[in-house]
Image: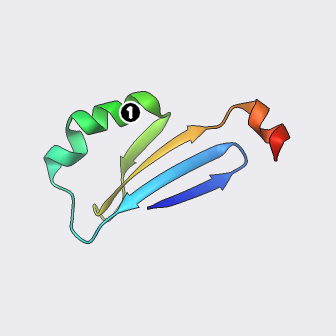
Amino acid sequence: MTISTAGRRIRITATGQHPLPVLQVHGPGALIISRLTESSGVSVDGFGLWAQLTAPAELETLQ
């Protein structure tokens, strides 16, 4: 699991040792993630998922 940031962009990536089955990539969990984030997808190698969102502008002043 990794979290990376660039400005207000936040990307969360979860990877594993085995390719993800199709049901995990397109199942109910994927629908929930797609509704909570701006974009999401499967890593190029098929071993992980990522989700991206943008933090509110107000949080930039707290850093």
Residue 45 position, x and y percent, is 31, 65
What colour scheme was applied to this rendering of the protein?
A: rainbow
Residue at disc 1, secondary structure: helix
**In which quadrant of the rendered view does residue 29 lie?**
top left
In the image, residue 62 above or below residue 19: above
Residue at 46%, 38% in the rendered image: 39
Disc tally is: 1
- In this view, the residue farthest toward the front is 62
- Reading the image, the residue beneath label 1 is 34
Answer above or below: position of 21 versus 54: below
The structure residue drawn at horizontal position 21% and vertical position 68%, both measured from the top left corner, is 18
Structural crowding at the residue carrying mark 1, measured as other residues with C-alpha within 10 Å and reported as few (<14), some (14–19) or many (≥20): some
At horizontal 16% and vertical 49% (from top left) the residue drawn is 22
- Residue at horizontal 35 percent and vertical 63 percent from the top: 15
Of residue 29 and residue 9, the one placed in the foreground of this image is 29
Does 34 sit left or right of 55 as displayed?
Answer: left
Residue at the far right: name it.
Answer: 61
In x, y percent, where is residue 56?
Answer: 69, 31
Image position of 30 (left or right of 37): left
